[in-house]
Amino acid sequence: MSASKKKVIKSSSILKEIEESTYLNFDTYIKSVSKPQTIKTYKSIYKNHLSQFANENDVINGARQYISIINYIDTLDKSPSTKKAIVSLLINLSKNSNPKLLKEFQQLQAKFHEEKQKLQFKALSKKIKDLPSVEMLTLYLDNMYIDEKWVHYIVNYLLINYNVRNMDLNVKIIKFKKDAKAGGNYLIVRKKDILYVRKDYKTHAVYGDKEIVINSKKFRNAVENLDSEFLLPQNNNLARDVKKYTYDKHTESDYLKIILSALDLNKDKAKIFEISKNRGTDIGTLLSTYHATPE
């Protein structure tokens, strides 16, 4: 028996539990959406994929059309991301309808989410193979210090040791903590160390201010030798500017992928937790987005 026939038989049994009065009204739902980009996205999905199942009033009979919709999505020659987006709209349309129908769509969404993650992992694994090793990054860091390229050294030191984002590198050099204003990032030069203060990073609203004491004498020396009060130019091209100083012009996310993928998920849990804390990213997101083992 083919896989498609199995799905239909399973769906037929579900239909008995879904009332005929289960209607999915796109027109009513879209009026409740406030974000313009979401409206635009859902209108496109509906027009291209779901309108064929609706009547002239943009109403889909969920019970009668369920099998047709599921089979359409399953056989659609599109990526798991596109299929997941279609099902996401169906979930929103079903929230005030039959709970069993909603559950079916949620299970389908989970399936496409898993497929999407597998593809992302495969692509990430391939990219990891083409990236330099942690040892290469460390060697480059050491050479930047020897060559007295202080900005290069500081940028790479923070990326390698504290796994920060581009915006975290937009720092001002100051001598007193009282001068650290809200909404900024600072390297505070103290007698024996550097206090790295972040008040402006992507997830600040969730994790608040972050402070790290950096005891490295080399790092302190590099900071003291800077010619400017800011580490990087004050403009809107942080990503471009950071790549000027990294090894082979790699991005900050490349650095994170290199470092994470060199770790063992079972043996290096403490280090992974530390990276999560440094970056201000939950461990689940960290591993699903940046960790892969080269094939």
Image (cartoon, helix red, strand yellow):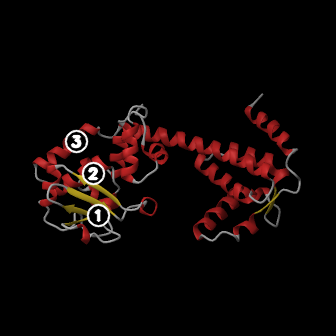
Q: Is residue 173 visible in this depiction of the protein?
A: yes
Q: How many marks?
A: 3
Q: Looking at the picture, does residue 153 appear above or below residue 190?
A: above
- The kind of secondary structure element at disc 2 is helix
Pick whichever, 221 or 46, lies toward us. Answer: 221
Q: Quadrant of residue 139?
A: top left
Query: How far apart in space, not on screen, are marks 3 and 2 (Cα)?
Result: 15 Å
Please state the horizontal and vertical placement of residue 135, each as a whole percent of the image: 25, 37
Q: Which quadrant is the N terminus positioned in?
A: top right
Task: Name the residue at 85% across, 49% down.
Answer: 18
Q: Nearer the viewer, mark 1 or mark 2?
A: 1
Task: Name the residue at 48% across, 38% down.
Answer: 122
Pick whichever, 136 or 129, lies toward us. Answer: 136
- The residue identified by callout 2 is 249
Q: Are marks 1 and 2 in contact (CB under 8 Å)?
A: no
- The kind of secondary structure element at disc 3 is helix
In the visual, does 110 lie left or right of 193?
right
- The residue identified by callout 3 is 138
Q: Quadrant of residue 265?
A: top left
- The residue identified by callout 1 is 170
Query: How far apart in space, not on screen, are marks 1 and 2 (Cα)?
Result: 18 Å
In the visual, does 244 lie left or right of 83?
left
What amino acid type is highlighted by mark number 3?
A: Thr
What amino acid type is highlighted by mark number 1?
A: Asn
